[in-house]
Image (cartoon, rainbow, N blue to C red):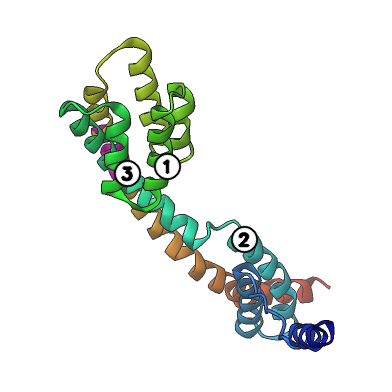
Amino acid sequence: MNRLRRPTARRRLARLASAPPTRRRPSPAKVGAVATAAATAVIVDGWWGVALAVPAAAVAYRVIGRLEPAEVKRMRLREESEAPICADLLAAALLAGAPVDVAVHGVAEALGGPLRERLTTVGRSLRLGAEPVEAWNHLAGMPGGDRIAAAAVRSSASGAALAGALTRLADDLRADRAVALEAAARRAGVLIVLPLGLCFLPAFILAGLVPVIVAILGDVL
């Protein structure tokens, strides 16, 4: 039996050794830095293009590196858009007479997505007898989650009706989201102009200011 197993083990090791190594994709920051350096060198001729390519690449690397990953941004935006709906559904379930943990589980099943896991954990914690602060803390970190948790904790401590607080909170979250979207639209108009400025500013300096400075220095010297 051992003789029969050894060739099999050796063949497995050989396959593992010959397996191609997994390639890591270059980060968007590195790709953007290289592209910025190449574009700067092409737009600005001569040694000035090479000299400006390095700082331009460094700036692009830092700016792109600070950008939020696409998947994280997608989940954050979905949670932000569903937070008012979550508050409304919780309020409706509570007004219908459902206990808090049952209402939370029902809303989790209705919404799905990234909120489902958070709300399911909250409902399970409440059903197992966890303190409200500990149970609702699972909503921390999501847009509007801290405010929903704070309203629920205040209701459990003071005995005030949670449904009314959640209804008002849903309206506030929608208003805040509308203001944020309007601010983002205004900011997008400014950001669109920045790449054009970065492209034309070096050319303007070299074509407009440098000849004047060289001419003045030539007359003086």
Q: Are marks 2 and 3 in contact (CB under 8 Å)?
A: no
Residue 203, image x, y percentages: 59, 76
The kind of secondary structure element at disc 1 is: helix
Q: Earlier in the sequence, mark 2 or mark 3?
A: 2
Q: Earlier in the sequence, mark 3 or mark 1?
A: 3
- Whether residue 182 is visible here, answered yes or no, is no
Q: Residue at x 43, y 28 (%)?
A: 128
Give the residue at mark 1: 118
Total marks shown come to 3
The magenta segment is: 171-179
Residue 201, image x, y percentages: 57, 69
Q: Are marks 1 and 2 in contact (CB under 8 Å)?
A: no
Estimate the spatial distance between the alpha carbons at disc 2 and disc 3, rounded to whole Å: 34 Å
Give the residue at mark 3: 108
Residue 38 shown in magenta: no
Q: Residue at x 31, y 35 (%)?
A: 104
Which amino acid is tagged 1?
Arg
Image vertical order of residue 102 relative to residue 3, above or below: above
The kind of secondary structure element at disc 2 is: helix
Classify residue 103 as left or right of residue 70.
Answer: left
Which amino acid is tagged 3?
Ala
Estimate the spatial distance between the alpha carbons at disc 3 and disc 1, rounded to whole Å: 8 Å
Q: Residue at x 47, y 31 (%)?
A: 137
Residue 142, image x, y percentages: 44, 41
